[in-house]
Every structure is written in structure tokens, then in C-alpha cells.
Image: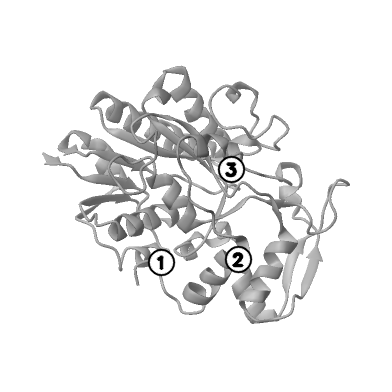
Amino acid sequence: MTSSRIIVTGGAGFIGSAVVWRLNELGYDNILIVDRMDETDKWKNLAPLKFEEFIDADEFLSGLNLFCPSVVFHLGACSSTTERDSALMMKNNYSYSAKLCNWSVEHDIRFIYASSAATYGDGSAGMEDGTDNLSSLRPLNVYGYSKHLFDQYAARNGMFERIVGLKYFNVFGPNENHKGDMRSLVNKAFDQINQTGKLQLFKSASPEYKDGEFGRDFVYVKDAVDMTLSFMPGTELSNDHARSGGLFNIGSGRMQAWNELAVAIFNALDMPPNIEYIDIAEHLRDCYQYHTQANLSQLREAGYAADITPLDSAVADYVRNYLQTGRHLGD
């Protein structure tokens, strides 16, 4: 039995590999990465990182008792918000999570998992973290529902006294190249602007918002992983709740318009803004979030005091130090 390891599921993916990178920076390399490799270039995220072992996600679940880690970061999931295969979503995002969580709790292992802001749906029930409001949330897609269902499961079974759920908002940054259509706008825009000299944004289909003036809570992946690691006991990032639990928002605390993000991208490329507004895709009209904004009061109360990188600075770092150079975290 291997002791004192850190397990990161989804460790070759976007946020997972960024967590491994930050752990390396903090001096940890006793890491077991759990993931499913595919035909994408996700493997490139692993190349610069230091870790002890890699294991396939299905093999890991069937051999849990071979491991005895100090903490599990469960960041692996099927994360496509346009995926329509409900069975796939429920197997990966609910059933897998429940089994791994139950095992962790049974063996007194710190369990920190990725929920999602997609659980909030259109935001009409608010975007307050914690468990008091879970029954009123109505996700807009099966991805959000699969995450929400596990949040409810954990709450119903009293697990949030010991485990941590993190509702990630719109995370962007290095190591997301493999995500295809689920890449951030910054990543997609970099290619589009280089090819055409302009950036296409959706027109508003809502009378409440002008074109490009609706938006998201955008958070840089480097900030998101510091917030994540603040719940791991024993590191320089640990917060006051590093040994307790709860359900927390992970974001910037601000809604910023797509137009603001577009201008930041053009500025990072030293180009004047050139934006073209196009009709929103038909399949997105009825399930589109026009406004997301993380309430970070619980995170702050838990002791996370670090400043959050301003959007223009985060975009500039991402574009100039990673997208233009082809680098990954750890290179």
C-alpha cells in the first residue's frame, strides 16, 4: 500500500494538470495522476510535470484499496456543456464521484472535488454557494445536472462537514488546448484573430442585454488552482477551513462582458479591436447563461485572502507567455 500520496483525477486535463503544476511549484511530486487518455493532445499537459505514477481512470476505481493517499483532488469529469448523452454524464460525473467520495470518507481521506457554476442554470435562483439553496437550482444542461445531483447527494448524506466541493465559474488559461469546442473564448479568439483579423461574438437574443454586453465571471486558471489548493491541509496556501468542508464558489467575483474580454485579447495581441456580432447558435438559445457572477463571501470567510488577477493582466499573461509561445504550465 502506497502512503501519503496526492491523487489528482483528471490530472492530464485543464484544471487537473494546473493543480499538479502548482503542487510541483510548492515542492510536491508524490502525485498519482488518474485520467483517461484520448486522441487529443491532452498528454502534452503532462510532459513538463513531475509525478510518481499515471493510472487509467477505470483501473483506478476498480483498485481503490491499493492506495492510501492523504488527499484526493477529484477533478476528472465529462465537462462538455453540449453533451447530450445523459447516461455517459451520469456514469462519469455522478456515479464515479459517489464511489470515490464514499471511499475517501470511509478512509478519512481529504476529498476535494469539482462541481460547477453550470449547476446555477440561468441564475434566477441566485448564485449563492453552500447547501441551503440546492433544491431551488435548475441547471440548463445535463452536464450541470450531473454535477448538481452529486452536490445534492453529498449534502443529503452530511458529507460537507468533511469534504469540499468547488463550483468553478469560467476558467481560462494554459493547458486547455485539448478541449476542442469547450476551450475558452481567449483560446479560440487567438486562433480566429490570427486567421481573420477579427473576432466573432454572439448577438444578444435577450432584450435585457445589448450585443456583447452580457458576460461571465472569468477566472484565470492560476487563481483557480490557488483557491483549490487553499483547502489542502499543510501547504503555504492552506486557509482556515483546510480541514473542514463546504461547497464554495471559485471565480473572480465579477461579471465582465464579452466585449471587455474581447478588448483585453486584442490589447494582448497589440491590435485594435475588430468585433463582428453573429446570431447565437440555435441549439444554445434556450440554455444560454447571460450572466454569471460568483459570490466569494464564503471563500473569503474561509480565509482565502489573495488578490485575484485582473482580467486584462490574466489575458496578457496567457496570450503572450503561453498561446504565442506554445508553452504549457511547467515548461
First in residue order: circle 3 vs circle 1: 1
Report the mark closest to the observer, 2 or 1.
Answer: 2
Report the mark closest to the observer, 3 or 1.
Answer: 1
The residue sitting at 52% across, 69% down in the picture is 318
Question: If the image is split into quadrants, where does the N terminus sit?
Answer: top left
Secondary structure beneath label 1? loop
- Check disc 2 and give the amino acid type: Val
The number of callouts visible is 3
Secondary structure beneath label 3? loop
Are there few (<14), some (14-19), or many (20+) residues within 10 Å of tag 2? many
Residue 142 is situated, as x and y percent measured from the top left of the image, at: 58, 37
Left or right: where 5 falls relative to 48: left
Left or right: where 167 falls relative to 46: right
Gap between marks 2 and 1 measured at Cα: 18 Å
- Check disc 1 and give the amino acid type: Asp
Q: Which image quarter: residue 182?
A: bottom right
For label 1, the residue is: 41
Gap between marks 3 and 1 measured at Cα: 24 Å
Q: Check residue 186 in the rendering and tell me which mark sits there, or answer none.
A: 2
The residue sitting at 44% across, 44% down in the picture is 77
For label 3, the residue is: 84
Residue 299 shows in the view: yes
Q: As rendered, which of 309 and 130 lies closer to the eye? A: 309
Residue 124 is situated, as x and y percent measured from the top left of the image, at: 73, 32
Residue 155 is situated, as x and y percent measured from the top left of the image, at: 47, 22
The residue sitting at 22% across, 56% down in the picture is 29
- Check disc 3 and give the amino acid type: Arg
The residue sitting at 51% across, 74% down in the picture is 323
Secondary structure beneath label 2? helix
Q: As rendered, which of 32 and 256 lies closer to the eye? A: 256
Gap between marks 3 and 2 measured at Cα: 25 Å
